[in-house]
Amino acid sequence: MPDRIFVAVAWPYTNGPRHLGHVAGFGVPADIFARYHRLKGNDVLMVSGTDEHGTPNLIQADAEGLTPKEAVDKYNRIISDDLRALGLSYDCFTRTTTRNHTVVVQDVFKTLYEKGYLIKKTARGAFQAATGRTLPDRYIEGTCPICGFPSARGDQCDNCGNQLDPDQLINPRSRIDGSAPVFKETEHFYLDLPAFAEPLTRWISKQSHWRPNVRNFSLNYIANLKPRPITRDIDWGVPIPLPGWEDRPDKRMYVWFDAVIGYFSAAVEWATMIGRPEAWRDFWQDPASRHFYFMGKDNIVFHTTIWPAILLGYGNGGRIAGGRGEPLQLPYNVVSSEFLTMEGRKFSTSRHVVVYVNDFLSRYEPDALRFYLTLAGPETQDADFTWADFVRRNNDDLVATWGNLANRTLVYAFSRFGEVPRPGPLTDEDRTLIDSVEGGFASVGEHLDAARFRAALQEALHLAALVNQYLTTNEPWKTIASDRERAGTVLYVALRCVDDLKVMLTPFLPFSSQKLHEYLGHDGVIAGAPERRTVREADGSAHDVLTGDYGAWTGTWAPPKLEPGQKLREPKALFRKLDPTIVDEELRRMEDGVAT
RNA sequence: AGCGGGAUGGAGCAGCGGUAGCUCGUCGGGCUCAUAACCCGAAGGUCGGGCGUUCGAAUCGCCCUCCCGCAACCA
């Protein structure tokens, strides 16, 4: 019986293309995890999408002279191209401006409302004079009442560090258009988080398999829960489905609220898309189904506390779930990454401290990036991307250890035998090596099960080094003159090991593993990239998603059968060795800000 | 202020109570099938600082320094 694995990946915000920091923390790790579980034969559903509502999107649209919809269409397209090029195998990468998402979000809202988990409250808020939209604190600046700093922000003063309320500022003004903000009373719905404090505490306390920082941080956070607003004064968002509210153009759901519900709505969309509208229940209502969430450390409490509270509140209620089946599943694990910096500095678009995914992939291979981010990325602590380190790891670890092993084995076997050599009797050494390498399916798998991606990759590389040692010791290029059978046997053993390692490395290096699969003379697809498909909804609207027919991939997390006599195909180098001079080129490119 | 995480040989990481381990780099040697790749050997750290607990601490406690995130409306 296969396990059901739901892979939920953080939703990128549509205010620009993705840079390396965006994909390092969750995109690549989540994809490795999903691919591994598919190879194991488990049922995997991996979802995400672009997060398209909220103030920053409006500001971005204004800045470009576009309507909000035009702007998010543009960036949805750019972002999904970035993710597709990296080979992130989403089953459904959608967006928050779909009809389906609106329906699901409204259903969740209404259900929470009917169950009494929403509180109506009035609070004082700041508004943009010209548009009447909410002006978030950080978009207000003025003179600090404490230290007199002229450019203090509404939430805190960067000069003296004091936290502020925006109406304390002297001469407050909007950072968007410079106008004075209007302060007035405004009524909103709040999610009654304190109502969930006890069940959340009980639940989190039991999650001993979570990373300690995730668990400790969350326990600390829920000790002091307050109601959290889930609606805003803004005209760009999901309408509030209550009488007296639904027709108001100035009140919408708060973007964070609609975004987290995307994990659920995307599963519903996927089910409809594959023609089995109830299939989402297999993942969301089967108590044996396990949900893994991947995000950056700044997002932990949304996934360990706030979203679980919403799920607890919804239960199996509402129109979508229809009161049938188990309550919606809570996260099984929340895998948060740390942050990536760029040449020692924080990523900053405006200061050109940035490398965009599309720009990177125009010059380098996706597998090289996936490799680097797995081995040197911010898995357990902040990590720094440097071009020098990228070149070094690409050349000295990826190309030298694994690329060269595959290459030296294949090139020699192809030129001397043209096929997988028929082995003579295997020696103890032959057997020992094969056993060690095939043991990787257990040892590498164990690390992957625990979301220890770096350790998993290191383990696989260690096994590749064993095969390099074996070849050097057994020297088939020498023995071939005197004992062709023994040389063939050694190559057979090495080829088998390469074939095994190819499978183990597929989650990390899907593109090159597919090539290697073909060089080894196998047919079929073991790994590919997602494709773009257009989804037409009931109301006639259409949008694109990333998805794929991954069930057609043929790989299995187990030693593949490599038949003696199988014809090899002419091999080419799997990876490109990089010239160290690119380091200076890239640094210059970054400084010039010509990265596009 | 507070809360959570981090600080280990030149670089990146693991170890988390018993005299510090891995990958890369460096130095020396071997090999030549392979993308000057591969293999063998060596040098190099007392574990951010201080004080404690203990027969014994990188590993536990307290204090300090620096970095990251959170700090109720940034998603």
Image (spheres, coloured by chain):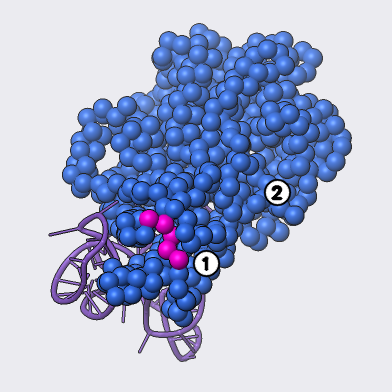
- From the image, tell me which residue sits under label 2: A4
Nearest the viewer among A42 and A359 is A42
Q: How many C-alpha atoms fall within 10 Å of the one at disc 2: few (<14), some, or many (≥20)?
A: many
Chain B tint in image: purple
The residue shown at (29%, 29%) is A595
- Helix, strand or loop at disc 1? helix
The residue shown at (55%, 58%) is A560
Stretch in magenta: A418-422
Tag 1: residue type?
A: Glu
The image quadrant of residue A22 is top left
Residues marked 2 and 1, same chain: yes
- Above or below for A205 versus A22: below
- Helix, strand or loop at disc 2? strand
Q: Which mark is residue A500?
A: none
Q: Position of residue A439 (x, y in %)?
A: 53, 69
Give the tally of numbered discs. Answer: 2
The residue shown at (53%, 10%) is A131
Q: Position of residue A70 (x, y in %)?
A: 50, 13
Q: Position of residue A347 (x, y in %)?
A: 36, 38
Chain letter for blue, please: A
The residue shown at (48%, 39%) is A87
Between circles 2 and 1, the one closer to the viewer is 1
- Above or below for A80 versus B45: above
- From the image, tell me which residue sits under label 1: A438
The chain letter under disc 2 is: A
